[in-house]
Image (spheres, coloured by chain):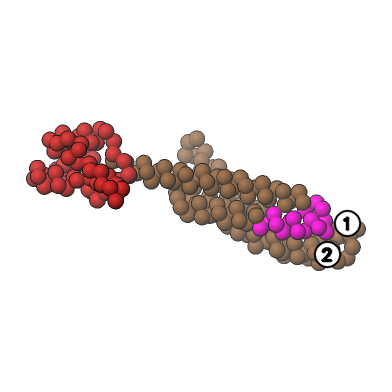
Chain colours: A brown, B red
Amino acid sequence: MNQRNKNNSIFLSQICVILFALLLLTLDIGGWWMAKWFVTLRGMPAQTHRYLLCSLYACSPAAWAALWGLWRLLCNLKDNRVFEEENVRIMRIISDACVAAAVISLVSSSYYLAFLVLALCSAFMALIVRIVRSVFRQAIEMRSELDLTI
Amino acid sequence: MEIRVNLDVMMARRKISGGELAERVGITPANLSILKTGKAKAIRFSTLMALCHALECQPGDLLEFVED
């Protein structure tokens, strides 16, 4: 992949992260109304509104942390800082955020079963990020060994 | 347990400076310093060969196995 393609790809990814951040912000601001609308639409019991809000606002910090991590990761990639310890730390944050979202979704599935799908997706995402993190850590070790081979 | 690099000893015996040795071997002074301070994790045969050639010595004169 040439430099221009690489930069375009990173730029597109950054735009996607911004779009997701805007979506999350909208959800944070309009969460109360959205949850109300959803409960009415589905004909759920009134107390579900409260539960939905709890799930929504509990997941929000994890989502912000994951988005911040993705943004930092993309900035580092843009600066050609790929196999760095900082990236491993960021991926740990993203993975932990996914695990947190999975746990919250799993608990939330007790009142709305569809959350189980979200929990599974988050857990799978956490697994993928964890594996990529291990690959990065291994690559960093290999690079440092290569750098110190005279 | 480690492999010690006795480069400074050989350099002193041959009365050769770091800069000159680096130039003769074809490595940077920074890399030579990594070798001298024992921070290197590996050494290429080609580098070892060039060092032995420049210092007129055997690999055993440069590398030493030290038990704890």
Residue type at mark 2? Answer: His
Of residues A7 and A32, the one nearer the viewer is A32
Q: Quadrant of the C terminus of chain A?
A: top left
Q: Is residue A101 magenta?
A: yes
Q: Chain of mark 1?
A: A
Q: Is residue B48 above or below residue A70?
A: above
Residue under the image location 44 percent in, 46 percent down: A140
Residue type at mark 1? Answer: Leu
Residue A3 x, y percent position in the rendering:
47, 39
Q: Which residue is mark 1?
A: A41
Measure the alpha-carbon separation of dots 1 and 2. Answer: 12 Å
Residue under the image location 46 percent in, 43 percent down: A139
Residue A124 x, y percent position in the rendering:
66, 46
Residue at disc 2, secondary structure: helix
Q: Is residue B30 above or below residue B53?
A: below
Q: Is residue B17 left or right of residue B28?
A: left
Residue at disc 1, secondary structure: helix
Residue A26 position by quadrant? bottom right
Q: Is residue A37 left or right of residue A132?
A: right
Q: Which residue is mark 2?
A: A49
Q: Which residues are magenta?
A: A100-115
Q: From where the camera sits, is residue A78 visible?
A: no
Tell me how many marks there are.
2
Of residues B56 and A14, the one nearer the viewer is B56
